[in-house]
Amino acid sequence: MSLRATASAPEYWSEDAVALCSDLIRLDGQLGSSDERAGAEYVATLLDGLGIESELVESAPRRSSLVARVAGANPELDPLLIHMHLDVVPADASEWSVHPLSGEVTDDFVWGRGAVDMKNMAASVLTVLKHRVSTGRLPRRPLVLAFLADEENAGVLGAEWLVRERPDLFEGCRTAIGEGGGWSLWTSPEQRIYPVHNAEKGWAAIQVTAHGAPGHASRINDQNPIRVLAEAIGRLTSDRFPVHLTEGVESLLRVACDVHGLSFDPERPEEALPLLGFDATQIRSGLQHTAHPTRTSAGYQSNVVPSVATAELDCRYLPGRWEEFEAELHAALGDQVEVEVLARTLGLTPGRRNAENGVWSAASTALQAEDPTALVAPFMTSGGTDATHLERLGIECFGFSPVLLPPDLDFWALFHGVDERIPSQSLRFASRVLDRFLDSY
Ligand SMILES: [Zn+2]
């Protein structure tokens, strides 16, 4: 099946997005071993060539974010913030088919770390700007473009820092688009749903500590803290957290049921998940709180029982329901361990969904012009984005980064995954959709 979604003539200008995405992938922004300076300077140079001034801001040496303002046809309108991040999670080259920083273009894909998270969107936005400048077309409203640092570390040195230290950079913005929504979810060859989100789960890093009786490992010891800890975190299975249906997941599941001519049962929302194909696992995470042990630490010698054992949990809670999550977490962990919240974001509570904000209709119009089967569905993402910080400035944030996928590609498995790649066709598609969006929103 062809990935081409529209019968309209190809627009060769959108080809630039492929080369740009490849370039951006080669600029190493892996957290832990590199930084965002090279990416920020590359974008600044490109914008400068288009006559667009930008400001490079550093929260720490070489931890660079770049912000630029672009004029709109109607300067009276409040500017649209488009936020993207320049950092990526690390990749282990030995696990990959190509080098993760190669930006290789083969088999009609651009390969490399950041291909879907989220140098793809940066490449498409820059392609649209290049085209608009060369053809003298201003976007309908002014734009604020933010290429941010440190998103993969909860935005501490990026969006969170900028919102606190440089809110002036976002002055006037009331609406933003960024990553996390806008991909094509195949329900049938005749219908693709594009989930666009304005709600996000909150995130918390939580430390669990077990204390016990240290001593020689040859002795009977029922207070071994490693065993106590293991039993506690071993109970954090997904079935320990009940299903809670929230507005964002319900709206997406209802659209999927409508497409298939089925009725939606709010008492059993999980029964609709198989309609979502590859995306079922991702959307399933939005039906409950989750807590995953991601690090453990204990002991120093194999024949010594230590006095303490710790684990770190990555927790994702439904927005606005922290107390409920804490109660479920404590019930699962039991009372033999101490629990400490190390860090936490609030997530994104649904904004004025479908009300006066024109993002939904502009996204629909832009998508349908390029994919006549497109149906936009509001949803809540179980991932976190910089929106959680930007919302504090009173900006209503949407996840809208258009992606057109072939039906056999598990998109969400590519995020932070091995062999991350984006179809070249999708980069062209995203450029054309965003271009249309900037005319109508
Ligand atoms: Zn991302």
Image: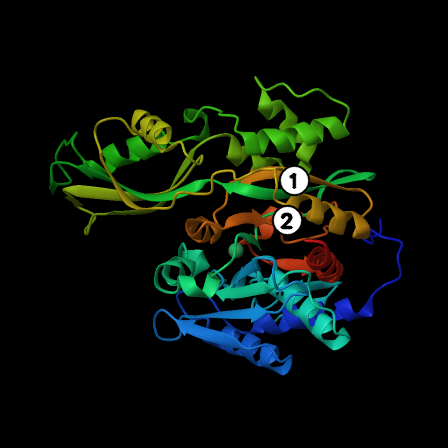
Would residue 95 be found to the left or right of residue 33 on screen?
Answer: right
Do we see residue 406 in this rendering?
Answer: no
SS label for mark 2: helix
Instruction: Decide: few, some or many residues near mark 2? Use Cα within 10 Å; few <14, some 14-19, many ≥20.
Output: many
Q: How is the image coloured?
A: rainbow
Q: Which mark is residue 166?
A: none
- Does the beta carbon at disc 1 come under 8 Å from ligand 1? no
Quadrant location of residue 324?
top left
Question: Looking at the image, is 58 positioned above or below residue 83?
Answer: below
Along the horizontal axis of the image, is 263 left or right of 397?
right
Q: CA distance from mark 1 to mark 2?
A: 8 Å
Amino acid type of the residue that numbered disc 1 sits on in the rendered structure: Phe
Q: Is mark 2 within 8 Å of ligand 1?
A: no
Residue where numbered disc 2 is placed: 411
Residue 411 or residue 297, whichever sits in front: 411
Q: Would residue 242 appear left or right of 430 to someone viewing this image?
A: left
Circle on res. 278: 1
User: Badge 1 local density, few (<14 within 10 Å), some, or many (20+)?
Assistant: some
Residue at position x 47%, y 75% from top? 55
Q: Residue at x 18, y 35 (%)?
A: 224
Rendered residue at 67%/64% (across/down): 124
Question: Residue 407: x percent and y percent?
Answer: 74, 45
Question: Do callouts 1 and 2 mark residues in contact (Cβ within 8 Å)?
Answer: yes
